[in-house]
Amino acid sequence: MSPQNKKGTRTSPRSTAKTSRGPVTVPNEAAQAPVAVPNEILARIFSFAVDDLPSESSMQTAMYIGKTCKRWRTLLYSTPSLWSRLSLEFVDIDDGTMDGVQKTTSVRGLRKCLALSHPMPLYIKFCVRYSTSDMIIYSRLAHCDPDIQIAMYMLLAQSSRWKQVSFVGTTYTIGLLHSLRHLKSQVLESLTIRALGNTPPTYSTYFDSGPIDLASRLKCLDINFYIPNLRPNWSCLKSLSMGFKDVDSCRQVLAKSSNLETLTITHIGSETKEGPGIGGLIMPNVRELNLSACAACHLFDGLKVPSLVNLGLIQPSDEQLHNAHQSREIRQECPEYPSPSDADKRIVGILENSGVQVKNFNAAWYSVPSSISSTLPLVQDASVVSLRLDSEVEMIFLDKLVHAKPPLFPAVQELHLFSDMITGPEAFLASLGMIEEIVRTRRAAGLRKFTLSRDTEWEDELEQDLPAFIYASSSLAQTLCQMNKAQDFEAQWTLGPMNEDILAYAAAFKAPLV
């Protein structure tokens, strides 16, 4: 018996390969011992595998990883950073009982994540949302499942470790915060609090009367309701999204926020006060400015943003309803339709005072073409353009995009069109031919990316829309599929909150018949 075949002797399987010099025996690489992967790389791989903690699926994935071998198990449970990014979501189930809640969150898993992540800073997304526009659900969702309250309290107990946190939910849910006085984490950099529904958070009626000092290192603040006496370190903020009860309070805050790079104003009340303080203001570092219609309408004169690159005319989503700005200090809701001419005039003033060339332009207001007729000529150099299609005016505006001389947005390289389901399916179908012509003509002029989306936040509205295969059977869908074959062009068309891929449907229509 040869030494290679003796019992207990390890051998490496070999294979024979033919070369120009004759047969050569080489080791079978598949049977060799694996190369040890450094812990840093393994931890990075694990982070992608468990990126949705503390959901049941991610917790189960973590369990399978831990069962692989002792080394993996030790690394997994001794690396706090793997457990520090948390996403908690509670969604109502519209099953007719008004008390169903779909959870992507495991409270038991949350408890484990909080323990294993200690003492690392926490990145938290907490969301309570709705799948229906039925307003009754709003008041029932947060009360019908105790896990929502338990999860909120568990997170509050870890507030000293918060680094980036986002709370979006019912006014009852946000009311569980009770006070912002505990938000003094030395590592807190980003804070988002958005209330859904028709009433302000419960705690705004008995909020502490004294000043509320937030974390000194806070860089990003996003809040959609008025909190009296809120006093972060304004000069440290890099990003601010906020509503204001009047133009005076808006200017006072902006004057203190000299280092802002991104500014979003979701609301400015119509009340004004006479006296000093209303006048010119230069914000030298702002590169992105987003304004709701009422914010643009009531903004003070003389605002200069000489570094402006991105301009957004935003339509507040359900997470930023204007009536969420109510409080004891704001008794009236924002007008549903602020004066378009006043808003247009303010925007023109900002652009002319700043002397800038906007590169990214997003117009999401309803009836955009008619409401910003004076603004459009000042943003013609934009290379990235996003537009909302409104059923009342979309055909007129689309016609201008096709036939205007000189053409609108001649330098556009990315065009994004959005149509929500308030626009009926018939009107949307009627516009597809015009959109196809726009894509064809702009493609020849240098368009490199085109996206079309049709969406709603409510499942009941989605049920009233047409099925995806009807849109996929359109000439526009087939044209976009053909254009997508070019290496220098990208097209996308999605439908609904699940982003159904219309072009994937369209491509499937051309599959050979079996």
Image: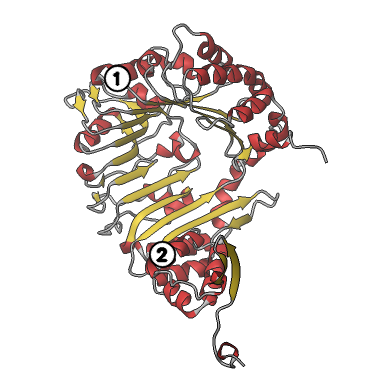
Residue that sits furthest to the right in the current view: 514
Secondary structure of the residue carrying tag 1 is helix
The residue positioned 58% from the left and 77% from the top of the image is 13
- Quadrant in the rendering for residue 142: bottom right
Quarter of the image where the C terminus is located: top right
Could you tell whether 295 is left or right of 102 in the image?
left
Q: The N terminus is located in which quarter? A: bottom right
Q: Decide which of 441, 140 is in the foreground and name it.
A: 441
Estimate the spatial distance between the alpha carbons at disc 1 and disc 2, rounded to whole Å. Answer: 48 Å
Q: Residue at x 63, y 38 (%)?
A: 501
- Amino acid type, mark 1: Leu
Residue 375 lies left or right of residue 433; in this view the side is: left
- Residue drawn at x 36%, y 24% is 296
Q: Is residue 203 left or right of residue 459?
A: left
Which of the pair 42/34 is nearer the observer? 34
Which numbered disc, 1 or 2, marks the residue that appears first in the sequence? 2
* Residue 424 visible in the current orientation: no
Residue 41: give its label.
2
Pointer 1 with pointer 2, Cβ within 8 A: no
- On the image, the x and y values in percent for residue 317 come to 48, 36
Q: Neighbour class for label 2 at 10 Å: few (<14), some, many (≥20)?
A: few
State the residue position of label 1.
Answer: 351
Return the x and y of residue 433 as percentages of the image width and height. 64, 18
Q: Is residue 231 above or below residue 261?
A: below
